[in-house]
Image: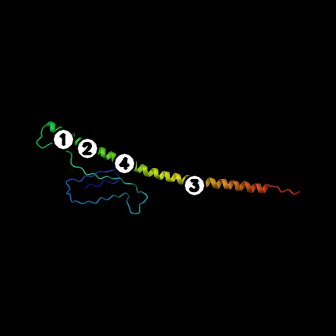
Amino acid sequence: MHEVPSGTQEGDFKLEHLKASSKFSICFQNHAHEDDEENEFDVGFNIRFHKPARTLDDEEEGPDAERANILAEKAWEIHQDWEVLQDHFEFLRNREGIHFGMMNEIMKRLKHWTYIEATLVIIMAMGQVMYWKKFFEKRRYL
């Protein structure tokens, strides 16, 4: 098992040679103390199960077999990096969707509040005009 050092943005760990009946617990902590809600943030993770990369038979020897094994390992590493990149993009799309929904809700509330304020300003302006009109109005007696 591998623990990611504090302050890093991401980390990987690998479990090898596991038994089929093994059970594991995974714990994520995104703040230092129980009461520290100010510094909380979203955590994304993905669990992948893979078989080892395919290799040549043990009878194969020589520089061509060695080169083929090196190429197979490189292809496997590229494939792993590609999957990690796809995970990052999926996390970013989800985060963008959450922020987009939150922004729409804020804008909707802001729009409603603006309509209320505009209505109150218009009513107050009309009330003031009527008050001053009545104040300056001269009564004429015949």
Q: Is label 4 in a helix, a strand or a loop?
A: helix
Against 84, residue 62 (above or below) is: above
Give the amino acid type for the residue marked by disc 4 in the picture. Answer: Glu
Q: Quadrant of residue 67?
A: top left
Q: Is label 1 in a helix, a strand or a loop?
A: helix
Q: Residue at x 12, y 37 (%)?
A: 62
Figure coloring: rainbow
Locate residue 115, reporting x and y percent. Answer: 59, 53
Instruction: Using residue 89 as the reference point, say whether residue 24 is left or right of it.
Output: left
Give the amino acid type for the residue marked by disc 2 in the picture. Answer: Glu
Foreground tag (4 vs 2)? 4
Q: Earlier in the sequence, mark 2 or mark 3?
A: 2
Per the model, the C-alpha gap separating discs 2 and 3 is 54 Å
Q: Quadrant of residue 77?
A: top left
| Residue on which disc 1 sits | 69
| Residue on which disc 4 sits | 90
Considering every residue shown, the one lying at the far top of the view is 64
Quadrant of the frame with the C terminus = bottom right
**Of 122 and 45, which appears nearest the observer?**
122
Considering every residue shown, the one lying at the far left of the view is 59
| Residue on which disc 3 sits | 113
Q: Earlier in the sequence, mark 4 or mark 2?
A: 2
| Residue on which disc 2 sits | 77
